[in-house]
Image: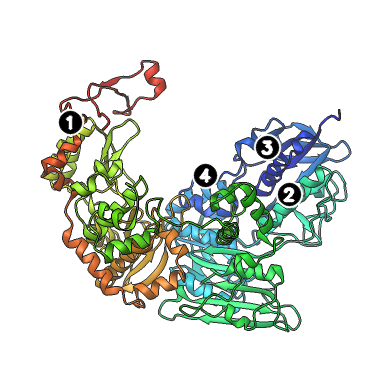
Amino acid sequence: MQSKQTVVVIGNGMVGQKLLDVLVEDGATDRWDVVAFGEERHLAYDRVNLSAYVAGASAAELNLAAPEVVGHPAVRMVVGDRVVAIDRDARTVTAESGQVVCYDALVLATGSTPFVPPVAGGDGPGCFVYRTLDDLDAIIAHAPDCGTGVVIGGGLLGLEAANALRQLGLETHVVEFAPRLMPVQVDDAGGSVLRSAIEAIGIGVHTAKVTTEVRRDGDRVTGLAFADGTDLVADLVVYSAGIRPRDDLARSCGLEVGERGGVVVDDACRTADPRVYAVGECASHQGRVYGLVAPGYSMARVVADRLTGGDATFTGADLSTKLKLLGVDVASFGDAHATTPGARILTWHDACPSDPSVATYKKLVVSGDGLRLLGGMLVGDASDYASLHQLHASGATLPAHPELLVLPSLAGASSPLPGAGAMDDGATVCTCNNVTKGAICAAITDCALTTVGEVRDATRAGSTCGSCTPLISGILDDELTRAGVAVDRSLCEHFPHTRQELFDIVRVRRVRTFAELVAGWGTGRGCAVCKPAVASMLATLWNEHVLDRDHASLQDTNDRFLANLQRDGTYSVVPRVPGGEITPERLIVLGEVARDYDLYTKVTGGQRIDLFGARLDQLPSIWRRLVDAGFESGHAYGKSLRTVKSCVGRSWCRYGVQDSTSLAIALEERYRGLRSPHKLKLAVSGCSRECAEAQGKDVGVIATEAGWNLYVGGNGGMKPQHAVLLATDLDTATLVRYIDRFLMFYVRTADRLERTATWLNKLDGGLEHLRRVVVDDSLGLAAELEAAMDHHVDTYRCEWAATLDDPAKLAMFTPFVNEPEAVEVDLAYVRERGQRRPASAEERAASEVAVTVTAGVGGR
């Protein structure tokens, strides 16, 4: 039996980790023991989404190192130890710690380092690079002492860094040496649209600027000086001016490097030493160093194949890019700059002087005979990227009038772009993970897949940047249809209609009960899917109490008991605190209630006070005291409006330009109790410093000197997404009208449990269509939507106040129907930091419980 050999991988970035993943997946670990060195203290993480870390994502959430890979018995991870030497004769590597590891094969995946231009004063305190989590920690630690941050470099990473500074609350500027932003990806016209959109959200853009000095007052940065004699105030500087390959180890051990750096490799990603490979940003292939992750992934797959005796080759990479930068879609593919001789250019530029953030620019480069799509770029609206990119990659013949590919679709007209079914099986759908349409179709057929999530898990398509997800969905629908499998979008087995169709039926036919709806348009007795969904529709349209006789049985547990069920069977109590504003007297009431019922008390992220640990039978008495003190139900239990967060605005803040607190209170009181497909959160910031984080909400309002800017579609749940700008400089009355229309349009047309971000992403025509509906009233719905909201406002009544006034409803809060006075006794708690919390199973078993409650909630 042949003994196992050892492959050493130097570098545990995204590409190094991809290599480990493929080695494990392909069974190469049967032949190879793997030793992987990473010099950072973290295992591999998603460096592409670094700005998410600033927005609140943890290092664990960005982690890319799957336990089954790093814990594999044939894989040894060495973290926080940098390799400092390679001895190719002895076939060893030496780490900074002194450990020496022998190898039979060596893979350099050392990546790159940020380029820091040689600027006077530019390497001291207050100057940072944007590359690692430690870099971001340093920036986050320094930012509170700063008012203005400047990013030197207006490329892809530079704009990501600008987004991070903006999230930290700094006045942000971007300085770019070239005459436009993202000079590699877009042309002058595209750069102009991108610049206008970014400036519209308050980021300063300074192009064609050569920085000559970082000015200082002692150790503190005070500004930048430019070669043209101008300057810019700054407290913090971030460099994002390009990368340089990490090829120092290769140089020191005598390997050839390229003219512009990078370890020279052949099509097998092998250096001149047949035992040494290089992948990713440290490698130079045919004189080119790739700065994107997708080519690095392709190189990793080639090396993994070679290590197992294969003959895979890397002959170059697709540099197509699709990104959302600072809320602006940017995409480019193929020969986007039209360098092909004889190429023709088709462009569409939809400028919007009143709101530059919504301008779009589309450019297609077609062959001289007009038959082939050579490349293109999209700025502002990249919804057609996946289809256009595939049209380019497949080399398919263009339609007779290719200009229609960039012109906006007319109402009712079908798209001129070919659908997913027209793609060749060999066409690459996911360039990040190199997954073809054929592989996706085979997985759908062989594994009987029916959802996009199942396809993603089975093939990895769409698991990295996600830009191909719409195309995957189209392929899935097409394959299911071809197989004779109906693509069922019914709400559930009891209703052969979508949620929107059912909503329209309820509205137009004025259906008032679930029984009436199922009798006329459904079958059976309903289920856990359709009952709460229909309950939400009825509540939205007619605003009757959710515990009325015809509605109570439709509710989820939380809605049924007007409180959130917690893990130990108790409930939380969350009174509404509009805008986060609360008087000392009401604070005292909350404290007294928490003390008297021994409730665990916590301030939430939505400016409320959450009281945990109330038994079911205690809820009415607790709420009686709260209602008497003027509190209302906070609806923390429903798919409805939760909070409207606010800063203190101009009332207290020296930067505030509008009264954000008063507006937040008004909005929360207007939309309180509004039932919707998913829970809703709003926020109002009193200035562009965005202390209320309005752009992370379903509806966000940010004050301007001239009024209010309205953002919609933020949040996104497990996939956080920034809101997009819908309208600017609105007076308060117009702002409220637009929010009325937006919310009601969303409530009526979204699917069950579909967040506003997902709904907007799927909306035909996207943001521009939404703007036409909400702002321009293109569908003639504005008056109806506003009237629907007025009805909701006029008929609102606190659900807990109404419950306390109705003995029949109060009877639902009795733990045992046949023994109204009985309570359960299986609750146990421990004291922690002065409050009680539920005891864990281990604590119960070890009899460490310090507090045992003698009464509790029973099941119904």
Coordinates of residue 818 in the picture (x, y in percent): 18, 28
**Does residue 325 appear left or right of residue 591 in this picture?**
right
- Assess whether mark 2 and mark 1 are in contact (beta carbons under 8 angstroms): no
Along the line of sight, the residue nearer the viewer: 669 or 504: 504
Local crowd size for mark 3, using a 10 Å CA cut-off: few (<14), some (14–19), many (≥20): some
For the residue marked with disc 4, what is the amino acid?
Glu
Local crowd size for mark 1, using a 10 Å CA cut-off: few (<14), some (14–19), many (≥20): few
> Mark 4 or mark 1, which has the lower sequence index?
4
Q: In the image, what residue occupies the spot 81% across and 59% down?
A: 258
Secondary structure of the residue carrying tag 1 is: helix
> Mark 2 or mark 3, which has the lower sequence index?
3
**Foreground: disc 1 or disc 3:** 1
For the residue marked with disc 3, what is the amino acid?
Asp
Q: In the image, what residue occupies the spot 42% across and 61% down?
A: 759
- Assess whether mark 3 and mark 1 are in contact (beta carbons under 8 angstroms): no
**Does residue 599 appear left or right of residue 296 in this picture?**
left
Local crowd size for mark 4, using a 10 Å CA cut-off: few (<14), some (14–19), many (≥20): few
Q: In which quarter of the image is residue 650?
A: bottom left
> Mark 1 or mark 3, which has the lower sequence index?
3
Mark 1 lies on residue: 596
Q: In which quarter of the image is residue 675?
A: bottom left
Coordinates of residue 744 in the picture (x, y in percent): 31, 64
Mark 3 lies on residue: 81
Secondary structure of the residue carrying tag 3 is: loop
Mark 2 lies on residue: 300
| CA distance separating discs 4 and 2 | 23 Å
Q: Which mark is residue 61?
A: 4
Coordinates of residue 281 in the picture (x, y in percent): 71, 54
Q: In which quarter of the image is residue 361?
A: bottom right
> Mark 3 or mark 4, which has the lower sequence index?
4
